[in-house]
Amino acid sequence: MRMLKVSTLGLAISFATACSSGADAPQAAGAHRAADTPPATPPAKTVFDPITHTPLDRARSVQGTIDESAERTRGAVEREERGDGAP
């Protein structure tokens, strides 16, 4: 029973030490950059660019359509609230 308490305490201390962010701990790559460090350059093109950019472009187009529709609806609601008549 005593061994279980000691091992549990040891595991708890090890876990807390491993998960803490100490001042002398090395920074994760890109986590905190100094102000004088230039920004990273974008990665070079890969063979997956055509595969990933097509759905992203399509999603941007759909989002644009949704934004336009929301703006029209917002305008119609505002006109109706002011009593300007039918849209």
Image: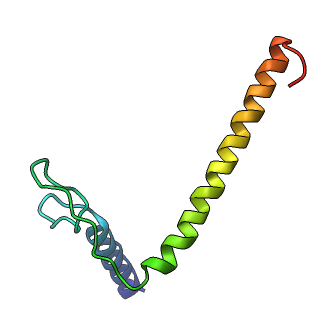
Colouring chosen for the image of the structure: rainbow
- Which quadrant holds residue 41? bottom left
- Which quadrant holds residue 57? bottom right
- Which quadrant holds residue 11? bottom left
Residue 38 on image: x %, y %: 14, 55
- Label total for image: 0
Query: The N terminus lies in which quarter of the figure?
Result: bottom left
Q: Give left or right: position of 61 versus 52.
A: right
Q: Residue at x 26, y 69 (%)?
A: 17
Q: Residue at x 19, y 61 (%)?
A: 22
Q: Residue at x 11, y 62 (%)?
A: 24
Residue 48 on image: x %, y %: 43, 83
Q: Give left or right: position of 6 versus 60.
A: left
Residue 16 on image: x %, y %: 31, 68
Residue 33 on image: x %, y %: 18, 55
Q: Give left or right: position of 67 versus 26.
A: right
Q: Which residue is most to the top? A: 83
Decide which of 61, 4 is in the foreground and name it: 61
Query: The C terminus lies in which quarter of the figure?
Result: top right
Q: Residue at x 16, y 66 (%)?
A: 25
Q: Give left or right: position of 20 versus 22.
A: right
Decide which of 75, 28 is in the foreground and name it: 75
In the displayed structure, 17 sits above or below 65; it is below
In the displayed structure, 78 sits above or below 4; it is above
